[in-house]
Structure formats: structure tokens, C-alpha cells
Image (spheres, rainbow, N blue to C red):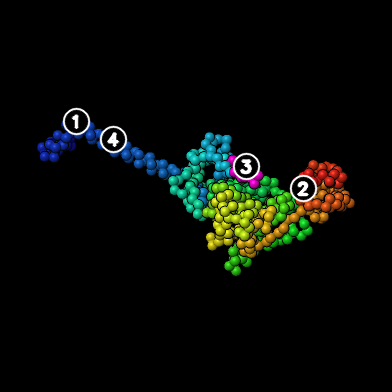
Amino acid sequence: MKESLDSELLVESLHSTRFGKIYSYLSANPYFGAGAGLAGLGVCLSIARKLVVISNTLFRRRFLISLQISNEDPAYPWLLDYINRNSARRTRQISVHTSISQAESGRTVTNFTYLPGHGMHYFTYNYRWIQVERQREKQVIQKGNYRAPFETVTLTTLGIDVRFLTNLLDKAISEALQHVETGLVVYRAVGPEWRRFGAPMRKRPLTSVVLDNGVANSILKDFQEFCSSSKWYTERGIPYRRGYLFYGPPGSGKSSFIAALASYFGYSVCMLSLSERTLDDDRLNHLLNSPPPCSVVVLEDVDAAFGSRDDPIQSSKTYEGLTRVTFSGLLNAIDGVASADERILFMTTNHVDRLDPALIRPGRIDVKQYFGCCTEAMFSEMFKHFYGNIVTEDMAVKFREAAVALNMEISPAQVQGYLLLRKKDPQASINDIATITHYK
């Protein structure tokens, strides 16, 4: 009772002071009361919002794990390809990358690659949902002398151990490398990057490409020695590069042997046409010096883009309008100051005499190999390869003698086309040999 009385006396004394009068006035003012309420509400909402942000941050730090990779990383296309295979049936947003190749005849081949589009996607890995966010930034990255949009892919999922996502990345990489081990992966140039062209091809055995005696073993030995000599090149300050020129008539097995050689050593193949209309010096330089790991670069029919500078038929004015790649740009891309180490380059041509000597001099081209028409030994070997154990050595000799008796140049491609139509009848192959001229 006494305490209550003391409190009332204290309040009355406060009201009697100047501060008490001001407090009473403001409390009785309805505008001040409303403003104080709004201010209090605003403060509460601000505090609540900060609590939500803090809670969300703490939740993400404690219960979410994430992994981000950019298109500057070599594993970026492998991860995208893995996501594409595992989320293709769930995602409704896809992006399309088109690669176009054109033969000398004018025939155009188009291939489409479908990837998750920019935005959010979801897929499962080891029974756990994963959020995928693919973003394209306004900034660009410099790839050699070529600019490309900067992209990132961020994987997010519930968990506390980031090894779950690193294991996923390891699996994506291992599957990509497994394709190389179980099949021949072919790359085509798309913008400033190498992109896989279709599904991996079946690996071609070296024995399926029949060449003249000693040719295959000579190239095989040189290739194998180069692949095992990285330290030797480094210690002597020599650029770790190797260039091969395969020349000869059409159908002699140049491209087929490159595919078989790459398959044998577990390499992928990067195909590039110098006659491509969108190719310029900067893009060529970047592509030649940034191939995917464990790959060889192939420039097919290089004579179609560049000839000899002394040949008036193949003068610079003739082919300058066909491509934006200059001859000096090609030379610099092959062995210029900015040329990368650890590169294996193949060139093929049907007309070696049309090539400028500067293009195929030592240092740019280290091994020159002629691929010719079938010899007597090649006729026998191709016949035995097609029919295996169902034919005798005597039948192979008869086929060889019949083919040689025609006294004409016959390419391995002609023999293959001829034998394919008689793959179950070796005797017919011997009897009908005169019709092989129809398979040019």
C-alpha cells in the first residue's frame, strides 16, 4: 500500500515538472500517437526482415552446399553435357548450338546440340535433388583474341559435405573421358570453342586401314615416341609440338588412318576446315592453340584454302574472297610466338604441289607421308582383312593377280566399295574384278 502511494506521488511530481508537461501534451496528441505507431511498426518490420536475411544466410551456410564453374574451365562443357543427359526430360528450357560443315561439293551437314537453357533447372543425383542455375553475365571473357560471353553454372543442394558435389563433377568428367576410351570423340569448332560433334564414333582398329608396307608402323612409332618425350622437349627448350602432312590421291586412306591412329592412342579428333566462311585469323589462332585435352587437330584438304604463292592459278587474290583466314595468319597460328605447346597437328591434301613451301617446312610439318593407290601387297591384305578365315592364301594371291592385271591405279576406297558388295562371296570378288572401275 505504501509502495503504490509512493508511485502515485512520483508520477504527480513528474507531471508537475516541465518534462512531465511535455510528455502529457505529446501523449494526448493523436498525430504523434499515429506516427509513433507507424515508426514502431517500421522498426519491427525492418528487424524482422534482417532476421529473415540472417536466418536464410545461416541456413544456407549450415545446410546447403554449392559448386560453381565457369565457361573458362575445361570441364564446363562436360558438366553441361552430364546435366543435359540427366535433366533433359524434366527441363522445359533448352538452348541449341548449331554446327555446320560444308563439303567442297557444296553439300551442307548440320548438327544440333541441346543444352539446358539459362535459368533454373533441377535433376537428381544419388536420390538427392539438385538445383542448377545457369547464368550469362553482361561481361565478356577474352579467349585468345576472341571474345565470348561469360557464363557460370551453379549447383546447389541440401547437405553439409561439399564432397557430394565434387563427386558429381568427378563423375561428369569420368563419363566424358570414358566416351574417349570407348569411342572416338569428334569435335567441331563452334564460335571460339570446340564442341563435341554428335555421339562418340566406334573406334577404328589400325588393322582396318591397309597401307603400303612399313607406312603404318613408321607413323605409329613416331607418334608413340613423341607422346612419351614431353620431358625431353622441355629440358631442351624445344616447343612440344608435332606436325604431320598426309598427301596423296582421294580415297587413299589419309583421314581414315588419322581416325584409327587417334583411336589407338585414346585421343579425340578436332576437325577444322580453313574454308569455313566465319573463320578469321584470331579465331583460327585461338582454336589451334586451345584444343581439348588428349586430342589432335586435323586440317583437311588444306590445299583448298591455300596454294603456292608462286602459282598464278592459286594467287592470293583468287582465294582471299573465299575465306577470312590469311596465309600469314595460318603460319603464325601453327608456330608463332603465341603458339601453344602439347599440340599434335595433322594436315591432309590431295595436291601437295599446290602447297606453299613455307607452310610445310620443318618446324611446322615434321613428318610428310605419301598415301598412294593400292600396291600388290595391299590388294592381298585388304582381301584377307575382309574375308578373314573363310579364304585361303591362294585365293588372296588370285585376287591380287587379277587386280594387278587391270594395269590401272586403284585406290583403297575403290577396293573397299567393291568388296563391300561381295562381303559374303570371295570367289565373286575374284571373278568380277574388272567391274572395280565402277567404284570411283
> Which mark sits nearer the N-terminus, 1 or 3?
1
Whether residues under marks 3 and 2 lie with C-beta atoms below 8 angstroms apart, the answer is: no
| Badge 4 density bin: few <14, some 14–19, many ≥20, Cα 10 Å | few
Q: Amino acid at mark 3?
A: Thr
Which residue is labeled 2 in the image? Answer: 414
Depth check, mark 4 against mark 3: the one in front is 3
Whether residues under marks 1 and 2 lie with C-beta atoms below 8 angstroms apart, the answer is: no
Which residue is labeled 4 in the image? Answer: 41
Dot 1 falls on a residue whose secondary structure is: helix
Percent position of residue 384, x then y: 82, 50
Q: CA distance from mark 1 to mark 3?
A: 82 Å
Q: Amino acid at mark 1?
A: Pro
Q: CA distance from mark 1 to mark 2?
A: 103 Å
Q: Does the magenta portion include 165?
A: no
Instruction: Please report the residue visible at 66 percent of the width from the left and 58 percent of the height from the top.
Output: 244
> Which mark sits nearer the N-terminus, 4 or 3?
4
Which residue is labeled 1 in the image? Answer: 30
Magenta span of residues: 100-113
Q: CA distance from mark 3 to mark 2?
A: 24 Å
Which residue is labeled 3 in the image? Answer: 108
Q: Quadrant of the N terminus?
A: top left
The answer to which of 235 and 246 lies nearer the viewer is 246
The answer to which of 128 and 345 lies nearer the viewer is 345
Whether residues under marks 1 and 3 lie with C-beta atoms below 8 angstroms apart, the answer is: no
The answer to which of 50 and 211 lies nearer the viewer is 211
Dot 2 falls on a residue whose secondary structure is: helix
| Badge 3 density bin: few <14, some 14–19, many ≥20, Cα 10 Å | few
Depth check, mark 1 against mark 2: the one in front is 2
Dot 4 falls on a residue whose secondary structure is: helix
